[in-house]
Amino acid sequence: MGKKKQEMAQVYNGSKNEFIFGEQGGKGKNLSSFLKNLSLTGSKSSNNSQESIDDMNSTIYGSLSYKKGRNGSNPMLSHGSGFVTQPPLKRTSSMGASYGHEHHHHHHHKETSPRFSSKGDRHHVKENYTDLDDDWNADLQDEVSKPAVPPPPFLDSLYPDLTVPISAAPQTHIKQSMEEEDLKKKAEINRINQLKHKYAKFKTVLSSETVINIQELRRLSWNGIPNELRALSWSLLLGYLPTNKSRQSSTLKRKRQEYLEGISNISVSFDENFKPDAGSNGNREGLIYHQINIDVKRTNPTIKLYANQSTQTSLRKILFLWAMRHPASGYVQGINDLATPFYQIFLNHYIWQLQRKQSKNSKDEDNDGGGGDDDSDLFIPGYLSDGDDQEELALLEDDNLKNYTINNFDTSKLSQRVTTIIESDTYWCLSRLLENITDNYIHEQPGIIRQVNELKNLISKIDYDLIKHFDAEGIEFLQFSFRWMNCLLMRELPIDLIIRMWDTYLSEQPLGFSTFHTYVCAAFLIKFSGDLKEKDFQEILLFLQSPPTSNWKEKDIELMLSEAFMWQTLYKNAAAHLK
């Protein structure tokens, strides 16, 4: 028996007409050959009788409607003959279980088939065999090539004729839309959770009862600071606000008083149309004030906040006082841009304090004094009054206060007390920043020239082909990158992204407004390398004066900062890499 099975394996192994069982069961072409060989392997004798073949057919088909031909001939074994359609018999529970019964039935009830009049005269009269599997005569290759479309789960896949065709296109579209909405909701939930987690980390550091861990604050700030805590964090990172909490209130009070005295000693009204009188220093002060007045009007012209007259007056005070106290450099165009991020974050911090106080008051009333979350330990001291600021009381009673942001707040609603505090904090933080890049604003601005040369040398190592193209077109780095160093990319990027970038700059030690900024400029330039290599002299300069960054998101800035950090890590310790 084993030997004959081995022979059968040899007959069918590798044959193109192999009778296939398993997942592709019910598909094949040379079934007659298969049955003959099966009868050989299943018989104990060499007698290849029709009766033996019938027995094996019963073994294979069980209770399926199988019709034998006349004189005991089997239509399955006729050469190329078809089948006669028969009414389907009742399906049994198991094909193998009915073998005995079916064997007896086929053995005693034979019919004479009209297919053969003689051995030599064969008429191909098609008699069909009825199988409950609809794919019996299907070609294997055709079936494999068909797209797999699963039937509806509530229909029997063995009866495809009963399947009602349903158009899947609308369902697919609805399903895709639902999946996209789910992904968006999940992304938004994930973003909110990340912000809450980040806020909690900063709160842990900034809520220290004694001394704030400045190293931990730097580490957290590199990846961005929550908007509500940015003013407090920047003041600490710049050294304007002491890390020792017991000294913070007294230091801020002294600094704010010093600023107020400085402004009061200046004989300038800071009115938009004011012109200083001629005197010993009148000409110099008049020229400085005139230039500041022009630049302030041009500052962030697309942002509503900087179109307010009260905002412009505050900026004129800050810039003019700084110019008077730093005669070595005086006022230089571009410093006006550097003051705006500080002014914006301190104003935002005050709005946030008001919103938290209003929310807390509302919860106190609802809970009969139970209160709510208290973030007062994260407030910069001095912004909120003790109840004697009428403008502040009006804001706290404003039902629209919770909706105020930098983009829609009118600074004319601020009291003089708060206006002076915001100006003072902006002035001192700006002064701290400019102390780190003083060389950029003294005579001939040597710091900027050095940074431009460092940028060119760095690009020659990162993208030499871009350097060659610039040389071929006659492009000098000073023509486009001078402004990048002078204004710290503030003319090239939206201010919200600049503020995010400064989170990282302020976390660097030393501050990243000089050396690290050069690497950021390199990453910024390389981002457009492919486009720039296709442009000529005029197109390059026009492109770099107004780069396509209006649609940039925070993730674009963070990617650029990461690339800058990578290049700084690779090159900052290399011998003479920027010389």
Image (tube, helix red, strand yellow):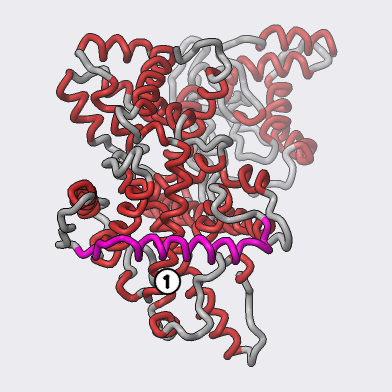
Identified at 48% across, 28% down, the residue is 515
- Identify the residue at horizontal 65%, vertical 58% (top origin): 206
Q: Is residue 547 above or below residue 355?
A: above
Q: Specify the amino acid type for callout 1.
A: Val
- Classify 10 Å Cα crowding around label 1: few (below 14), some (14-19), many (20 and above): some
Depth order, front residue of 210/532: 210
Task: Kindly identify the residue that appears in the image at 38 percent across and 49 percent down.
Answer: 325
Q: Quadrant of residue 52?
A: top right
Q: Is residue 250 magenta?
A: yes
Residue receiving disc 1: 418
* Left or right of residue 447: residue 268: left
From the top left corner, tell me how far across and down residue 566 is, in percent: 54, 25
x and y percentages locating residue 54 in the rendered image: 69, 26
Q: Is residue 189 above or below residue 123?
A: below
Q: Quadrant of residue 125?
A: top left
The stretch in magenta equals: 244-271
Give the quadrant of the N terminus. top right
Q: Is residue 86 shown left or right of residue 205? A: left
Rendered-image quadrant of the C terminus? top left
**In-image side of 60 versus 111 (left or right):** right
Residue 410 vs residue 254, the one in the foreground: 254
Rendering coords of residue 214 (x, y %): 65, 47
